[in-house]
Amino acid sequence: MKIGDIVKLIDKPKHDWMENYHDKRFEVCDIMTVSMKLKIVDSDPEWFWLVGKDNFILVDKETTN
């Protein structure tokens, strides 16, 4: 993953509360050693998360067009 990529939650994220956000897409804003800063796509106001990388996968560009 790199800054600007669009990601989504894996099927079984590490924390139960994350499952409420399976329908959301996230833009990668910054990447740290084991975590990322993500922005929820189309959120108003902008909503950011600092979360572990292992909870997300890249969105297939074919399915987002």
Image (tube, rainbow, N blue to C red):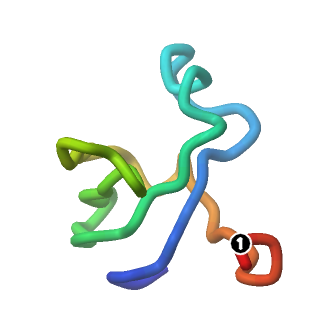
From what the image shows, is residue 42 above or below residue 51? below
Q: Quadrant of residue 58?
A: bottom right
Q: Nearer the viewer, residue 46 or 19?
A: 46
Is 27 displayed left or right of 59 in the figure?
Answer: left
Please name the residue shown 51% across and 26% down the image: 18
| Residue found at the far top of this picture | 16
Figure quadrant of residue 13: top right
Q: Is residue 60 left or right of residue 26?
A: right
* Residue displayed at 81% across by 82% down: 62
How crowded pointer 1 is (Cα within 10 Å; few <14, some 14-19, many 20+) is rated as: few
The C terminus sits in image quarter: bottom right
> Residue 21: x percent and y percent?
55, 31
Q: Is residue 43 above or below residue 60?
A: above
Task: Name the residue carrying label 1.
Answer: 64
Task: Report the residue at 22% width, 67% height from top.
Answer: 32
From the top left corner, tell me how far across and down residue 2 is, in percent: 40, 84
Name the residue at 31% across, 57% down: 38
**Residue 3 or residue 12, whichever sits in front:** 3
Q: Is residue 27 left or right of residue 23?
A: left
Question: Tag 1's secondary structure?
Answer: helix
